[in-house]
Amino acid sequence: MKKVTRTIALVALAGLTASAHLRAQAEFIDVNRSVRDVASHGPVKTVHISGDVYALIGGGANIVVSVGDEGVFVVDTGAAAQWDNIIAAIRDLSKKEIRWIVNTTLDPDHIGNNEKMSNAGKTVNGNPAAIIAHEKLPMRMLKLPVPVPVTARPVNTFFSEQRDLYFNDDPIFIYRAQAHTDGDVFVHFRHADVIAAGETFLTTTYPNIDVANGGTTQGFIDGLRKILDLAVPKHLEEGGTYIIPGHGRICDEADVLEYHDMIVIVRDRIRDAIKKGMTLDQVKAARLTRDYDLRYAAPSGPGSTANFVESVYRDLSAKKQP
């Protein structure tokens, strides 16, 4: 793995006073919360990223689309309620067949239109568009409290740590990331130099470590390190490889590095607390994430401080057991 440091983040903060830093963080979290609101309730916006790759923002989770002579390649299918807006945005980009669909995770805002998207396209053999996923994902979908119907589950699966294919003159690599769940993946469009990160990377909230579905703290760290290995920054660390998070704004390597470092630092703090015999309630009371809460904490739910701290604590505590 290439050497990663926090130099970028430290340089950016060095010129800020404490009060200015707090104001900057407050402005940043306000922007991120606005992004979440738009993604849940607003129209679907199309953003050109690079080459033939576009992002659809506002369909639930961020959707990534590659368009070209061979057809349409889609990463995640968005929230069910936004189907009409999503398919209209795709058809504005291309009238060619949807050929491939990748599921990066099992959350409803990522897979809510699997069946409709598949039926809206065709493989070269005339079947509905194929849905690709790591083999762990459909097994997890089947065991959810409300199982995903068989018609919406991916059947084109792989069991290794990566899969690749060539489409629209772009080598596309699908990498497993045992982060949010043990079946999560992210997608690298090598020619366009764009990474669709799925739930492995977010700008809006803390990571959601779904321990019940195989997610791990180390899986997030490893997945982000892999993204950092693949990403190449441009002049003065800005631009270069573009990374599209599962939720939030378009990013570059520096943004991923900051998120990676946050998880590592919080992980280490909680691990030290566990070694000292602190209970979960004591760890929560210690506010070990207080220097990151203003930027990443969701008001409630999976991306909240409480959920993040509890997930890391239970994940690390379980690893201590024989």
Image: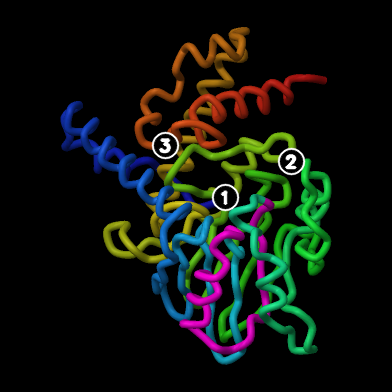
Q: CA distance from mark 2 to mark 3?
A: 23 Å
* Residue type (three-letter) at the residue carrying disc 2: Asn
Taking the image as shown, residue 236 lies to the left or right of residue 247, namely: left
Residue found 54% across the figure and 63% down from its top: 82
Location of mark 1 (residue): 199
Q: How far across and how far down the image is residue 186, in percent? A: 60, 59
Location of mark 3 (residue): 296
Q: Are the residues at dot 2 and dot 3 in contact (C-beta closer than 8 Å)?
A: no
Taking 216 as reference, is 316 above or below it?
above
* Residue type (three-letter) at the residue carrying disc 1: Glu
Q: How far across and how far down the image is residue 238, in percent? A: 31, 59
Q: CA distance from mark 2 to mark 1?
A: 13 Å
Q: How far across and how far down the image is residue 174, in percent? A: 65, 65
Q: In which image quadrant can residue 189 be found? A: bottom right
Q: CA distance from mark 3 to mark 1?
A: 14 Å
Label whose residue precedes the other's in the sequence (2 or 3): 2
Label whose residue precedes the other's in the sequence (3 or 1): 1
Q: Which residues are magenta?
A: 79-106
Taking the image as shown, residue 8 lies to the left or right of residue 95, namely: left
Identify the disc placed on residue 213: 2
Q: Residues within 10 Å of mark 3 (few under 14, many from 20)?
A: many
Residue found 57% across the figure and 59% down from its top: 81
Q: Residues within 10 Å of mark 2 (few under 14, many from 20)?
A: many
Could you tell me which secondary element the residue under label 3 belongs to? helix
Residue found 52% across the figure and 68% down from its top: 64
Q: How far across and how far down the image is residue 306, in percent? A: 53, 24
